[in-house]
Image (cartoon, rainbow, N blue to C red):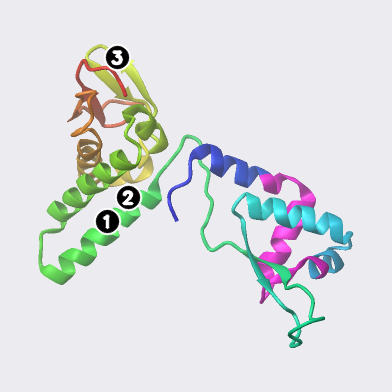
Amino acid sequence: MAHRSRAERVTSVAALDDPTSRAVYDYVSLASAAVSRDAAAEALGVSRRIAAAHLDKLADKGLLTVEFRRLHERAGPGAGRPAKLYRRAADEVTVSVPDRRYDLVASLLAAAVTEAVGTGAEVGETVNRNAYDAGRAIAAATPDLLEALLETGYEPHRSDGGLLLSNCPFHRLARQYTDLVCGLNLHLLRGMTDDSPAAFRPVLDPAPGRCCVRLEGPGPVG
């Protein structure tokens, strides 16, 4: 599943603030099979219409998936339409304030270790190469540099001589494994900026309260 924007993730989690929606989600999550509207209504003591509204809302927010299947063996004329059934979505939805991307750094590190074990390549070099490639993929998917930085969690703002990144998407890991994660971060941002018309150059420049990398250059963003 592609990374969802922060706004989408906040909206998904906010759907569970409603007590009935949360009860419906919990019921579907604990069920051993896909759940029908009738089953949810009976289990929660609400009308079928209310159960259906909450199930569809949770599906629309990406928290449940939908499938259609007959609940009996009859087929042909008179068998009726397949029932609409719901399961919990396999993909997790996480929201943090400020935004963190531990999923991204975990994927990069796991891929690098797997490659290094299989080929004998040096792990650090493999991490940095994979991070650079990931940055290029992010830039290809979101060509506007400012938007790409925001969606990756960096919170960029203008400063003399370039952009400062107010947030580190890998904050906790960067504090524990500074050299590894800051190096990964630098190469990720190089991949994101190399083909950008904004002509920014990522440089390591650690300082309290912001990302360890800043983007140096006078070019306009976007």
Do residues under tags 2 and 1 come within 8 Å of each other at their CB atoms?
A: yes
**Residue 78, image x and y in percent?**
82, 81
Residue at 25% from the left image edge and 11% from the top image edge: 160
**Residue under pointer 2:** 105
**Inter-mark Cα distance, 1 to 3:** 31 Å
At 73% from the left edge and 73% from the top edge, which residue is drawn?
Answer: 82
Give the Cα distance between marks 2 and 3: 27 Å
Q: Badge 1 local density, few (<14 within 10 Å), some, or many (20+)?
A: many
Element on which disc 3 rests: strand
Residue indicated by mark 3: 159
The three-letter code of the residue at mark 1 reads Leu
At mark 2, the secondary structure is helix
Can you give x and y, in whole percent of width and height, for residue 208 in the image? Answer: 32, 26
Whether the magenta-drawn stretch holds residue 55 is answered as no
**Nearer to us in this view, 32 or 80:** 80
What stretch of residues is rendered in magenta?
Answer: 15-38
Q: How many marks?
A: 3
Taking the view exactly as shown, the residue that stands out farthest to the top is 160
Q: Amino acid at mark 2?
A: Val
